[in-house]
Image (cartoon, rainbow, N blue to C red):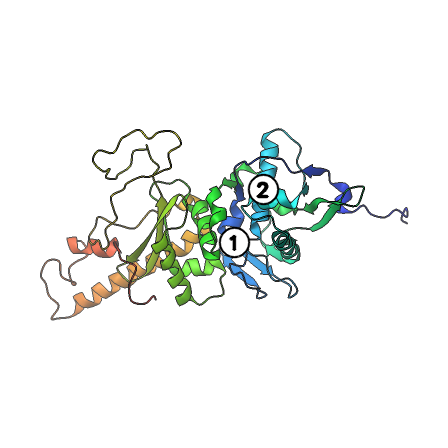
Amino acid sequence: MTDGRKPRSERGQLDLFRALPGDFAPRDAQDLMAYPFFSLAKSKRVAPIDFAAGSVSIRVEAVPDHGMATIWDADILIWAASQIVEARDAGLRTSRLMAATPYEILTYVGRGTSSRDYQRLKAALDRLQSTTISTSIRQPAEGRRHRFSWINEWQERSDREGRPDGIELIVPDWFYQAVLDNALILTIDRAYFDLTGGLDRWLYRLVRKHGGRQREGWRFDFHHLHQKSGALSPFKRFAFELRDIIRRQPLPGYTLFLETEVGGRKLLAFEPTPGCGKPVNALVLSGTPTIVPSGTGGSCYQEPKQGVTYGSKIGNRSLNLESNEDSNFEERADDVENIIRSAAGGLRKAEKPDAPSMPGAAGSLPDSPASDSVSRPVLARLPLDLPGDR
């Protein structure tokens, strides 16, 4: 028997959190930075994203009316995460129910404030609300899935006289809990909002999440990056666009390199760009003052990277296993397979009766100096105009 009362809506159970004024640092959720949750194209995407790596599985689905939420729409979630963290750190009470004016959101993420920009904001909210995600990330039991939309609901507000008074939106608990966990939030460069390409934006978030401030940088296999992006473009097109990004160097705070293994596998490597006034392994132009006046824009001179480098001076970069387990699982499997293939090829040549026995030849014994090139494959850093991609 029921008491006849209507169940309270989600909105009625939440306290309203009013957006804070100020131009504070943007924050992003690491889960959103590391995995393919958004469309990277400006055109409408309806085809779902399916991703699986280790224990992580993700499926993102869209409806034909609105299409999938894009990586530009995710700026609204960055705004929301930044608001929640800033308020929490100030000792204020936060909530999943948030209120703001379109002007506050648009100016924070570096957009215009014309009527057309307002309409685009509403379309972005529609895509965020209609896109559904099913994932195993941060689920307590193996095999369980959490299903949600990026925004549970949103509506336009009005004052007592009926004039527009901003918007209200409710973010999902999966996202809200990640934002409240300091270990799952990273500060990003405000210049991120100036990146216009979807692949540029996705790559910056991935680099910022995995690379962090580690001095030795990071590297990713091109094929694994293609899978991790969730992009619909074929691999050859994706590889072409990656190489163009390496040529342009658009990512704030990071330098990108193209590396290739002896077997031909191509890697995207990146490392933090050293800041002015910090000790770096670089050349400084003679006569350059060591003290830069306050307010002067950053301008550092570095020793240029060589176009082609061979030998043992450039080796495989560290996999940084402690913070990239899913990605490195695949990397380690590929590396082991490459070593096994190289060793097997060497043994086959050694078994031939006419195989050369000179030191350093392909048929040399495993404990000879030449075997180092098998057990420790080196990388050659190559120019960007290589013919074709695997």
Question: Mark 1 to mark 2: distance in Å?
Answer: 26 Å
In terms of image quadrants, where is residue 384? bottom left
Q: Can you give x and y, in whole percent of width and height, for residue 385 in the image? A: 29, 62
Q: Position of residue 113 (x, y in %)?
A: 60, 48
Q: Label 1 sits on what residue type?
A: Ser
**Label 2: how many Cα within 10 Å (few below 14, some 14–19, many 20+):** many
The residue closer to the viewer here, 119 or 345, is: 119
Q: Earlier in the sequence, mark 1 or mark 2?
A: 1
In the displayed structure, 46 sits above or below 12; it is: below
The residue wearing badge 1 is 55
Q: Pointer 1: residues within 10 angstroms few (<14), some, or many (20+)?
A: few
Left or right: 339 in relation to 97:
left
* Residue ID for mark 2: 81
Q: Residue at x 29, y 37 (%)?
A: 280
The kind of residue tagged 2 is Ala
Q: Residue furthest front?
A: 114
Examine the rendering and report whether any part of residue 88 can be seen: yes
Q: Residue at x 13, y 58 (%)?
A: 360
